[in-house]
Amino acid sequence: MQVSKWGDSLAVRLPKALVEKMGLRAGDELEIVDVAERTLVVHKEDRRKAALERLASLNWSLPPDYKFDRDEANER
């Protein structure tokens, strides 16, 4: 892979095969967990899944007559 300049940072393009193998999508977050002999060890964070699991562990229940109203939720 070639390292490219991206603003004040550096970036690399990930090959399609690697993207598919890791199940990556635009917006996913990666964490570099180790560097050894010019090799990066990367961990894919699934923050959305982790957040949903934390919410599920709270065992909350909504009232039976609850109805979500998107417009009401987005009022400012």
Image (cartoon, grey):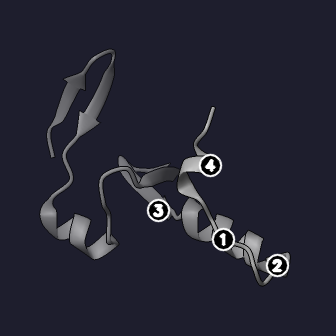
Pick the front one: 53 or 39? 53
Pick the front one: 32 or 47? 47
Distance (Cα) linking label 3 and label 2:
36 Å
Check disc 4 and report the residue beneath it.
Answer: 72
Q: Is residue 41 left or right of residue 51?
A: left
Instruction: Give the number of marks.
Output: 4
Q: Quadrant of the C terminus?
A: top right
Going from the N terminus, do you reach mark 4 or mark 3 first?
3
* Amino acid marked by disc 4: Glu
CB atoms of marks 4 and 3 within 8 Å? no
Dot in front, 1 or 3: 1
Residue 54: image x %, image y %?
75, 70
Quick check: can you spot residue 34? no
* Amino acid marked by disc 1: Lys
* Circle 2 crowding by C-alpha within 10 Å: few under 14, some 14–19, many from 20: few
Distance (Cα) linking label 1 and label 3:
34 Å
Residue 20: image x %, image y %?
23, 72
Distance (Cα) linking label 4 and label 3:
34 Å
Q: Residue at x 32, y 71 (%)?
A: 23
Going from the N terminus, do you reach mark 3 or mark 2 first?
3
* Amino acid marked by disc 3: Lys
Dot in front, 4 or 3: 4
Check disc 1 and report the residue beneath it.
Answer: 67
Going from the N terminus, do you reach mark 4 or mark 2 first?
2
Check disc 3 and report the residue beneath it.
Answer: 44
Check disc 2 and report the residue beneath it.
Answer: 63
* Circle 1 crowding by C-alpha within 10 Å: few under 14, some 14–19, many from 20: few
**Picture layout, residue 5 above or below residue 76:** above
